[in-house]
């Protein structure tokens, strides 16, 4: 079985081959299907969603953020803190960004809310470089989201979680070597749709199926 680091670097390499048009199309698909998923989680009422700003060759998420905001939802974005903790800032289209001191990303400027803000979200979109059908996720290697999910699970409040990846990054069950601190996610959001992960999901025909 390939190691997490091998899978991560292979998918990072493949991502770098995407053209600007492919990235743009991915951002559109992620926005449409992500907004639908959020509408289902929110049940018709305004709610909060934890999102993140996709950087570099990650699936673009700015359109998704804008769609959620336009639908009346509150959009929370992560800020890296010491000890690989995340705080959360409420984003609007006029929120300024500055570069993070801890990771190669831009972060919103504003009042920083603790992890309990993510706990009260109606859904959490997570960055990932790959997931498998068991729900195991590989991120960028920082462990920020593993710690967040651990905090949520141990507080007994895990909002619905969905990992954002490209279609080719939803891997067969058993492909990702899970470590004890890894916290599985229930769904993946790809440019083609939402894929259900976890036990009993292997019969799922996946995005684009009738
Ligand atoms: N957009 C984004 N924000 C995030 C995360 C993330 O994975 N993505 N994080 C999750 O924990 C935390 C920050 N950790 C990060 C650690 C490393 C890289 C990184 O090396 N990025 C590569 C891009 C790789 C790619 O295109 O897939 C780079 O900028 O070269 C990014 C974020 C919080 N915010
Ligand atoms: N709950 C936790 N408490 C303490 N350390 C943790 C926890 N979860 C993960 N870690 C540490 O974080 C490091 C990175 O983990 P991993 O490679 O799974 O990150 P990732 O899932 O790719 O990143 P992210 O969660 O930020 O997207 C690991 O070396 C692990 O020791």
Image (cartoon, helix red, strand yellow):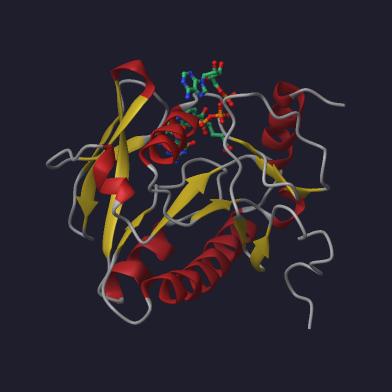
Q: Quadrant of the N terminus?
A: top right
In the image, 45 versus 207, the foreground residue is 45
Quadrant in which residue 115 is drawn: top left
Number of residue marks = 0
From the top left corner, tell me how far across and down residue 114 is, in percent: 22, 37
From the top left corner, tell me how far across and down residue 129 is, in percent: 63, 39
Relative side of 66 to 196, left or right: left
Residue sitting at x 57%, y 69%: 29
Q: Quadrant of the C terminus?
A: bottom right
Relative side of 159 to 135, left or right: left
Residue at the left extreme, as displayed: 111
From the top left corner, tell me how far across and down residue 178 is, in percent: 70, 29
In the image, 45 versus 138, the foreground residue is 45
Residue at the right extreme, as displayed: 1
From the top left corner, tell me how far across and down residue 39 is, in percent: 42, 76
In the image, 197 versus 27, the foreground residue is 197
Residue sitting at x 75%, y 75%: 208
Relative side of 188 to 94, left or right: right
Determine whether 74 is above or below 18 in the image. below
Residue at the top extreme, as displayed: 83
């Amino acid at each position: 079985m390939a190691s997490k680091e091998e899978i991560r670097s292979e998918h990072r390499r493949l991502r770098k081959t995407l053209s600007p048009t492919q990235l743009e199309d991915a951002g559109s698909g992620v926005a449409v299907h992500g907004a639908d998923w959020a509408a289902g989680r929110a049940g018709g009422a305004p709610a909060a969603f934890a999102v993140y700003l996709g950087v570099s060759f990650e699936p673009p998420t700015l359109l998704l953020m804008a769609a959620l905001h336009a639908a009346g939802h509150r959009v929370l974005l992560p800020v890296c803190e010491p000890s690989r903790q995340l705080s959360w800032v409420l984003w609007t289209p006029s929120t300024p960004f500055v570069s993070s001191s801890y990771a190669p990303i831009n972060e919103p400027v504003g009042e920083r809310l603790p992890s309990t803000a993510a706990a009260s979200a109606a859904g959490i979109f997570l960055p990932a470089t790959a997931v498998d059908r068991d729900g195991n996720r590989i991120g960028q290697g920082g462990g920020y989201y593993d710690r967040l999910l651990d905090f949520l699970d141990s507080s007994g409040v895990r909002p619905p979680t969905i990992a954002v990846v490209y279609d080719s990054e939803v891997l067969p069950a058993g492909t990702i070597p899970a470590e004890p601190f890894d916290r599985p996610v229930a769904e993946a959001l790809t440019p083609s749709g939402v894929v259900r992960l976890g036990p009993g999901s292997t019969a799922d025909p996946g995005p684009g199926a009738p």
